[in-house]
Image (cartoon, rainbow, N blue to C red):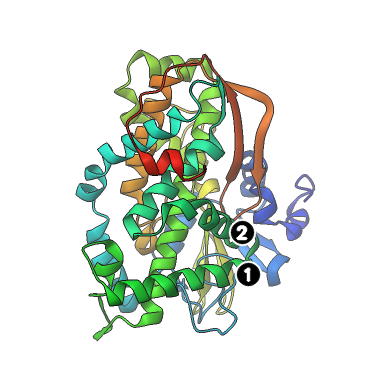
Amino acid sequence: MNDDRGAESWREYNHIELSVRPDAPQVLDRLRAQCPVGRSEKFGGFYILTRYADCVAAATDPRFSSSLQHGPGAGFPHTKARDGTLQIPMINDDGQRHRDFRLPLQKLFSPKFAASQGDRIREICDGLIDRFIEQGRADLADQYSIELPAILICELLDLPADRRREFQGWASDLVANASNDAMQKLVQLTEDLYRLRTESPGQDIPSKILEFSIEGHPITKDEWRGLVLLLILGGLDTTANAGSHIFEMIGQSPELRAFLLEDRSRIATVIKEFVRVISPVSQHSRGVTEDVEVGGHQFHKGDVVLLNWLAANHDPAVFEDPHTFNADRAADRHLGFGHGPHRCLGSYLALVELQVMIEQILDRLPDFELVPGGVTRFPSLNRGISHLQVTFTPGKRRDHGVEEVRDANG
């Protein structure tokens, strides 16, 4: 993807390929400067919005639809079950149907609920760190950032925690490669869980979703399965990617590390700035339902438009010196979890996870250093890191007794 020759060069723009480039924000700077509303012929052709104001406008305009009836849904390349019966609701719905899914689910993932998980998240983090702290080296992506949300989502959805890496692999393959095989396995997982929950409902989140009413009727089996699949994908992907990027940033900046170590309370206040810089939810796509103008460009019915949150979060018209992490920045306007009706539902829980993840690493591995060449990125709709090798001064286990964390991987 040559990005130095003007607007024509962007016709080969591939958002999946760009996700592995550490300089992705700078590449998007050039796109914004050369053609703020870009055009790529990849994946059947789509437009790219890079300015903050344009992304916000499209995200809040119902003429830019997430429905599969009007485009590829929230992300593309897109895949679905081979029999065509299972779609992921809410994220690929609009209007009243979207609200019927989102409002009751929003109550389940409220700020109060997220805060209530803090102690359990800290236990899991300590259990994970116990597994490698005596060794003086670790993979903070594979052994920590990826593991924590996987364990937590398994507990919240009553899935077997000892199969979490299997689920993680399927989810990554689906998000990164639109893998139909991965989709089939995840569909079967929701089928098995549906059978268990209908036979023996409890007080867990999947059981509560069985009580939802969608468009005036009880939630159907396929709607339930699709919604649980959405929670699995969201729970396994967003926080894991953000956590790994944060540790990479800390490892690259002695000043940032010293700033956070000097006063641990600062961690809570700078989480949103981390999210702005990283943009763990990097982009969403929309299908245009009727002719509409945004950013000086006339879109037509049937156009596919990519709202690039990463580019918007690095727009100098909104954020001064946007590529610099600024602990004093008021980053509440960030779009790192998207914007509008489809903003990431689990953002409150993700913020708690990220805060505790950072606190525990800086408490127990304060001198960790990145291993040269130890970062492995993978292509995805979002910016994924699969490995982040570090070294540190060995420490002592705390042995919190989190058996499922210590035993699940043997």
Identify residue type, mark 2: Asp
Look at 22% across and 66% down and name the residue there. Answer: 202
Nearest the viewer among 63 and 177 is 177
Residue at x-position 34% and y-position 53%: 155
- Mark 1: secondary structure: helix
Callout 2 crowding tier (Cα within 10 Å): few <14, some 14–19, many ≥20: some
In percent of width and height, residue 306 lies at: 56, 61
Write the residue at 43% across / 71% down: 190
Residue that mark 1 sits on: 181
In the displayed structure, does residue 277 sit left or right of residue 99? right
Q: Is residue 40 left or right of residue 200?
A: right
Does the CB distance between marks 2 and 1 fall below 8 Å?
yes
Task: Decide which of tag 2 and tag 1 comes sooner along the chain.
Answer: 2
Answer whether residue 369 is visible to the viewer in this image: yes
Q: Is residue 104 above or below residue 167?
A: below
Badge 1: residue crowd in 10 Å (few <14, some 14–19, many ≥20) = some
Residue 99 in the image: x percent, y percent? 29, 72
